[in-house]
Image: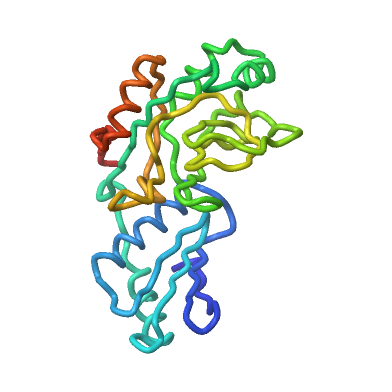
């Protein structure tokens, strides 16, 4: 439990702070703690909300007291999870880059001093760690964008960005889960819905998992979109030990 702090957050929340930096190691520790909590099925837990370097636990004080929950968490945090006991889950997200789907991809390429093809290759060659979800339902804060394609946000944000748009904002990349305003440079679009309120599980992914962007042409994009619209498309998921 070295450097880990447990803090009170109001009368029905407990905050565990794992550090003060954004790192894959801290994120992996948070994910491991969540899995251990799920396995122990602690009564009275209402919600578990991971962030970059912390974990907020909302609980029902009529079911479990703060002192009892704190003791349970202190015991749980002493459990070590070895790297070879963890599983890496990677969601392969198809993206049609450029054209009307990614109107800013040339801006990204010009800023990087690269060709559009090189930008696509770089962007689609990484498994991006999902550090946390927020801002919008299903919006993923991803880590691992290659510094070569870091690109400033637009000086004048758009009023409406379409659901499924894939973009870059500074040192981050991500997917817009619904129509919304935004200032990211748009490089492509996916037909996959990372958030669908009609789905049994509305949010597709979880913090601690990974996303890999897979380039597809427009014909393949439209084929997948038709399957998505019919509820027949299943995202490819790779599971690796490590």
- The quadrant in which residue 161 appears is top right
Left or right, residue 201 beside residue 185: left
Residue at the spot 45% in from the left edge and 63% down from the top edge: 49
- The colour scheme used to paint the residues is rainbow
Above or below, 112 against 136 in this view is above
Name the foreground residue: 188 vs 12: 188
Rendered location of residue 150, percent (x, y): 63, 29
Residue at 44 percent across and 24 percent down: it is 124
Residue 142 visible in rendering: no
Relative to 50, say whether 15 is above or below: below
Give the side of residue 104 with respect to residue 129, left or right: right
Measuring 63% from the left and 29% from the top, which residue is drawn there?
185
Inspect this view and state whether residue 9 appears: yes
Q: In x, y percent, where is residue 148? A: 61, 23
The location of residue 218, given as percent across then percent down, is 41, 15
Residue extending furthest right?
A: 155
Residue at (37, 34) in percent of width and height? 192
- Residue 103, quarter of picture: top right
Q: In the rendered picture of this protein, how many numbered marks are placed on residues? A: 0
- Horizontal side, residue 124 vs residue 183: left or right: left
Give the x, y percent position of residue 101. 52, 22
Side (left or right) of 196 relative to 107: left
The quadrant in which the C terminus is found is top left
**Picture quarter with the N terminus:** bottom left
**Residue 89 found in image quarter:** top left
């Amino acid at each position: 439990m070295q450097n880990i702090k447990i803090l009170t957050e109001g009368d029905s929340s407990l905050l565990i702070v794992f550090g003060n930096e954004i790192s894959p190691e801290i994120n992996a520790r948070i994910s491991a703690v969540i899995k251990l909590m799920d396995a122990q099925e602690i009564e009275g837990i209402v919600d578990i909300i991971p962030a970059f370097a912390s974990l907020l636990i909302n609980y029902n004080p009529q079911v479990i007291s703060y002192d009892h929950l704190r003791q349970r968490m202190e015991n749980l945090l002493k459990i070590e999870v070895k790297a070879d006991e963890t599983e890496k889950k990677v969601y392969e997200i198809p993206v049609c880059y450029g054209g009307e789907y990614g109107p800013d991809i040339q801006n990204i390429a010009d800023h990087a001093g690269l060709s559009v093809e090189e930008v696509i290759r770089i962007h689609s060659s990484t498994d991006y760690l999902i550090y946390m979800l927020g801002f919008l339902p299903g919006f993923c804060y991803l880590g691992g964008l290659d510094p070569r394609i870091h690109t400033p946000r637009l000086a004048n944000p758009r009023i409406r960005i379409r659901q499924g748009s894939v973009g870059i904002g500074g040192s981050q990349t991500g997917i817009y889960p619904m129509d919304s305003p935004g200032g990211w440079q748009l490089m492509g679009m996916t037909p996959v819905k990372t958030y669908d309120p009609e789905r049994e599980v509305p949010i597709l992914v979880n913090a601690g998992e990974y996303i890999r962007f897979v380039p597809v042409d427009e014909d393949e994009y439209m084929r997948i979109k038709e399957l998505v619209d019919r509820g027949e498309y299943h995202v490819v998921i790779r599971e690796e030990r490590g």
